[in-house]
Every structure is written in C-alpha cells, then in structure tokens.
Image (cartoon, grey):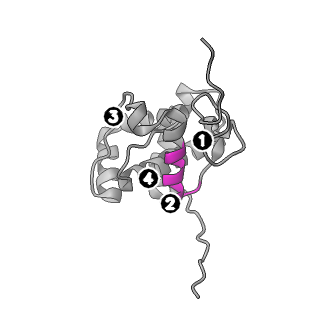
Amino acid sequence: MTTAQERTATDARTLLDEEMRATLVSNTLDKLPQLTEEKAERGVGQMLAFLAACAYSDRPLSPSPLVDDFWHAFLMYTQAYQEFCERKFGKMLHHKPGFLDRDEHGGGKALRARTVDAITLAGYEIDMEFWPELDLAECSQCHANCSDSPNHPPTRT
C-alpha cells in the first residue's frame, strides 16, 4: 500500500530576489495606497504563484483584478520581467488581455477556480484574500446556486 505524503506549499515570493520584490511592492503601493506594505508583499507572492502556474498549465488561467495589478507592476520592468521568465520558466509569459470564450473556458469564476487549482498543483500557497470572487460560496465546485449553476432556477421571462 502506498501512502500519500502531504507537501508543504511554497511561498512564491522566493522566486524573485528581494530587491525586485521591494520595487514591485513600492510601485504597487504608489498606485494602490489603500494597501498595507504587508498586503502588497503578499500580493507580489500571489502574482508570482500565478505566473508559475501559467508556465506549466496547458489551459488558460486568469488573475484576479488585484493580482493583475501586481503583474502590471512587474511588466513595467520589461527587461527584468523577461529575464525572470526565461530564468524561472524557460520562456516568456505574455500578458494577453481580453475575454476568453465562456462556452469553451467557463466564466470568470470558473477560470479563477481553475487558476487557484493550478497554483496549488504547482505547489504554491494560496492567499484567498487575493481571490475574493472564489470566497463567495462555501463550496469547492461551481454549483452554489450561482446564476450559471445547474442548480440555479431558470430565470422567468
């Protein structure tokens, strides 16, 4: 009989050197002064975990709006961002804004759930404060009587 060993999740902030993390925290705080320094530091970690998941996923993933703000902060340092991607993932991770076909990829909540699952599978910590749309229902699947749930009663016309 084989037993599964539980793996400890890794803090993705360790993927990036301290100096660049501090720069991203500072720049994001300038743009979003309502954040605390501690939350901005955690946000950088969630953005890095998202990027790591994207590097290994064969399906599209989607950042939360706040995680996307941290990604934009990193993208502003194009050379550092490109070098990071090449060094850590062996390829450039391009930002492709736009909407994915809902029928093919699911809606926003389904994409974010897939993203969080991919981050977890990649071995990184999830900080649910950065994925708030997933905290709306106490379930692990998209059947919480949401508007797109099969359990949701049809709308009357």
User: Measuring 32% from the left and 45% from the top, which residue is drawn there?
Assistant: 93
User: Where does residue 108 sit, x and y in percent of width and height?
Assistant: 50, 33
| Secondary structure that dominates the magenta span | helix
Give the residue pinned by disc 4.
Answer: 53
The amino acid type of the residue labelled 3 equals Lys
Q: CA distance from mark 1 to mark 3?
A: 25 Å
Please report contact status of discs 2 and 4: CB closer than 8 Å, yes or no: yes
User: Measuring 53% from the left and 26% from the top, which residue is drawn there?
Assistant: 31
Image quadrant where residue 98 sits: top left
User: Would residue 47 appear left or right of 38 to someone viewing this image?
Assistant: left
Give the residue pinned by disc 3.
Answer: 96
For the view shown, which residue lies furthest in the top direction? 157
Please report contact status of discs 1 and 3: CB closer than 8 Å, yes or no: no
Q: CA distance from mark 4 to mark 3?
A: 15 Å
Q: Which is nearer the eye, 139 or 39?
A: 139
The amino acid type of the residue labelled 1 equals Cys
For label 3, the SS is loop
- Is residue 124 in the magenta section? yes
Give the residue pinned by disc 2.
Answer: 121
User: Where does residue 36 sit, x and y in percent of width and height?
Assistant: 66, 36
Mark 2 or mark 3, which has the lower sequence index? 3
Please report contact status of discs 2 and 3: CB closer than 8 Å, yes or no: no
User: Would residue 58 appear left or right of 69 to someone viewing this image?
Assistant: left
The amino acid type of the residue labelled 2 equals Leu
Give the residue pinned by disc 1.
Answer: 142
- Is residue 46 in the magenta section? no
Mark 4 or mark 1, which has the lower sequence index? 4
Look at the image and give the residue range highlighted in magenta. 113-125
Judged by depth in the image, the label closer to the viewer, 4 or 1, is: 1
Query: Disc number at residue 69?
Result: none
